[in-house]
Amino acid sequence: MSHPCLTIIRHEHGALSAMLRSITLLLAEHRRRATLPDFAVLRAMLFYVDEFPEKLHHAKESKLLFPKLRARSAEAAEVLDRLDREHAGGEQAIRELEHELLGFEMMGSTEQGEGRRVRFEQAMEKYVAFYLEHMRIEETVVLPLAQRVLTDEDWKELDTAFLQNRDPLVGAEADGVYRELFKKILMTLPAPLGLGSALEALSGTGLVRSAQVR
């Protein structure tokens, strides 16, 4: 049986993966061109990662999905504990990335520029690798376990909660306060490198448009 909760989690994972990959591709493209990136766009992308997955997606996993799994089975207790710790550390990880980005932006045109660029690129690559592994574990361990052990009542509660998510990158219409941020991000994704079409496929809408890396 298909559950909206599982579909939403997988779609949000896909959108976040595309967003994270787009950041690393943008950085690689600007390094290749020996140019500085659009720092406002990078800040918007990191804000998205902080605002939607960290504060909305993770909270519903840790506060709703994981407790229900613990109540039904002890099979993945260690894995769930690890994922909860990673969720708890997510905000600090984003703050550190934002600090490295600020250092790159403020010092990028000085003699420290190359060192600051390298520090941010390395921090970003480490974060992306961590996050992709985090989502892989959720999809290969947690979601299959949920399909085996959760009850109809569990699914009803989870589906109701996750259907309230309003992540514009997976097809939900962006709230007014986020609409301009959403447009800015979409218009600067590196579509020639494959991200634009990937996000359009994930969202199931015609909102994503191709845009060249500037």
Image (cartoon, rainbow, N blue to C red):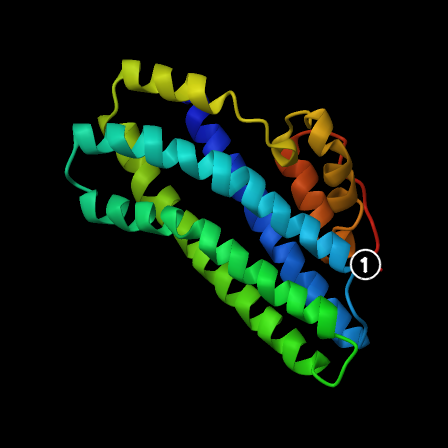
Q: Is residue 58 left or right of residue 20?
A: left
Q: Is residue 57 above or below residue 135?
A: above
Whole-percent x, y for residue 10 in the image: 48, 37
Q: Seen in the image, is 162 located left or right of residue 153?
A: right
Q: How many marks?
A: 1
Residue at image coords 69%, 28%? 174
Residue shown at 68%/70% (left/top)? Answer: 104
Image quadrant containing the C terminus: bottom right
38 to 2, vertically: above or below? below
The residue that label 1 is drawn on is: 213
What x and y, as percent, mark residue 98? Answer: 60, 59
Q: Specify the amino acid type for callout 1.
A: Val
Image coordinates for residue 108, horizontal then vertical, percent: 74, 74
Using the rendered view, name the quadrant where residue 64 is placed. Answer: top left
- The reply to whether residue 136 is visible in this rendering is no
Q: Give whichever of 188, 3 is nearer the camera.
A: 188
Q: Residue furthest left?
A: 74
Q: Is residue 184 left or right of residue 125?
A: right
- The residue positioned 25% from the left and 18% from the top of the image is 151
Instruction: Tell me if I can see residue 91 in this picture.
Output: yes
Q: Describe the element under mark 1 as helix, strand or loop.
A: loop
| Quarter occupied by residue 60 | top left
Instruction: Tell me what residue is drawn at x 59 percent, y 63 percent.
Output: 99
Residue 177 is situated, as x and y percent measured from the top left of the image, at 71, 29
- Badge 1 crowding class, 10 Å Cα cut-off, few under 14, some 14 to 19, many 20 or more, is some
**Quadrant where the N terminus is found in the figure:** top left
6 up-or-down from 30: above or below = above
